[in-house]
Structures are given as structure tokens and as C-alpha cells.
Amino acid sequence: MERALVRQVQGVGLQTQSHYLIRRKFWSVFERTFRVYTMDGQMIMLVQHPIFRLREEFIVYADEAKSQPIMRFKTRQMVAINFAYEVTDLESGQHIGTIQKRGLRSLVRDKFKILNPAGDEIGHMEETGAALLRRMFPILTSRHEIVLGGRPAARIRQIFRFFIREFEVQVNPEVGEPRFVLACAMLALIAEASRER
């Protein structure tokens, strides 16, 4: 997975960055758009997630015009308890990993397994904090953690805002491929947003 992606988006060397912001509008009708910004305000990644689609598939872009596709997430099946998203690097065409939701274990707290291309588990993503309370009181802010190879790769913390969803992402550039880690973070937030339907 390390060698499959180049650690740069729009000229930003991601191996030197440790903090990002992910933003999306609170209200959306047909799709939710997630944008990733560096702390100096430069947008480096964008995902438009369709709300009404039986089989989920979405592309991560490096620019607002969607002219530079980076990765594709696609579910293996239309209906399942443990949805598995296959992640493809669109520059090389390589399958770089799979993120699988842990169905019943995610009822109270979102949990995902992260698998390498061979299908071996190499890490996990998990919602942390007062997850059960958040399901009863959605106004409470969320937290997530991404672990790869037994080491923390990223922590995601929601910042309370009235008309926008904003999340601070603190990453460890030495653990995992930064673009893949950020894409994992967006997938965790997409799963969380699906509860708003």
C-alpha cells in the first residue's frame, strides 16, 4: 500500500503535513460533498457521495473541477451487513486495499477493518467517545481513530458548527499512506452521515 500511491496532491507534500480539516454542508438533497483542506486553507481532496444509490461507488478527486481522480471506492455487493469497500488507485489501476464495515458490531459504535490487497487485516477504524449517546443526541460531536499496523495513523475530531460539518484530522505521516488514510477518514464520516437520512 505504501508504494501504490504518490504522497503528493496538488503540489502539497503530504508526508510533511500532520493536520487537515474536512468540511461538508449540513444540508444536502442528492449528495454530500466532503472537502479536505490543509491548515493554510488549500483544498487538496474532494468526494461527492451520492445519497440515493443501491451500490455505493464514489471517487476521490484532487481538485474542485474533478479533473484529477485519485482513488475509487466501490462496494462489492448491493445488500450486506458487512459492507466492503474496495479501494483502487486510479493513477496506476492497482487495488490498494479494502475497508470492511463490521456490521452488527457497528450498531452502537462504527467499526471497520482495513485489509491489504491480499485480504489480510492490517488495521482498523473505530468511532470513539460517547457513541451511544450520539445516536440519541446527534448534536453531540464525534470522534474516530484509525490504526494501521498497531500504530495510530489518524484521529478525527468534530468541531461544533451550526451550518456546516467540520472535522479536524490529525495524522501521523509515518504510518500508512497519507492519501489513503485521509480517504479512510472520509469514509468514516460518510458512514456517520448516512444516519442523517
Image (cartoon, helix red, strand yellow):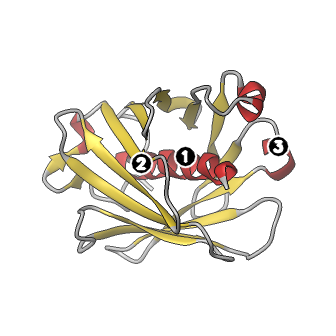
Instruction: Locate residue 83: give its quadrant.
Output: bottom right
Q: CA distance from mark 1 to mark 2?
A: 10 Å
Circle 3 sits on which residue? 107
Q: In front: 170, or 107?
A: 107
Which tag is nearer the camera, tag 1 or tag 2?
2
Secondary element under disc 2, as helix, strand or loop, is: strand
Question: How busy is the neighbourhood of tag 3: few (under 14 within 10 Å), some, or many (20 plus)?
Answer: few
Residue 104 versus residue 162 in the image, above or below: below
The residue sitting at 33% across, 47% down in the picture is 36
Q: Quadrant of the N terminus?
A: bottom left
Name the residue type under label 2. Answer: Arg
User: Real-space Cα distance between discs 1 and 3?
Assistant: 15 Å
Residue 7 visible? The answer is no
**What quarter of the picture does the C terminus occupy?**
bottom right
Residue 66: percent from left, percent from top: 28, 71
Q: Earlier in the sequence, mark 2 or mark 3?
A: 2
Q: Which residue is mark 1?
A: 189
45 horizontally vs 188: left or right = left
Q: Give the Cα separation between the discs numbered 2 and 3.
A: 24 Å
Q: Residues within 10 Å of mark 2 (few under 14, many from 20)?
A: some
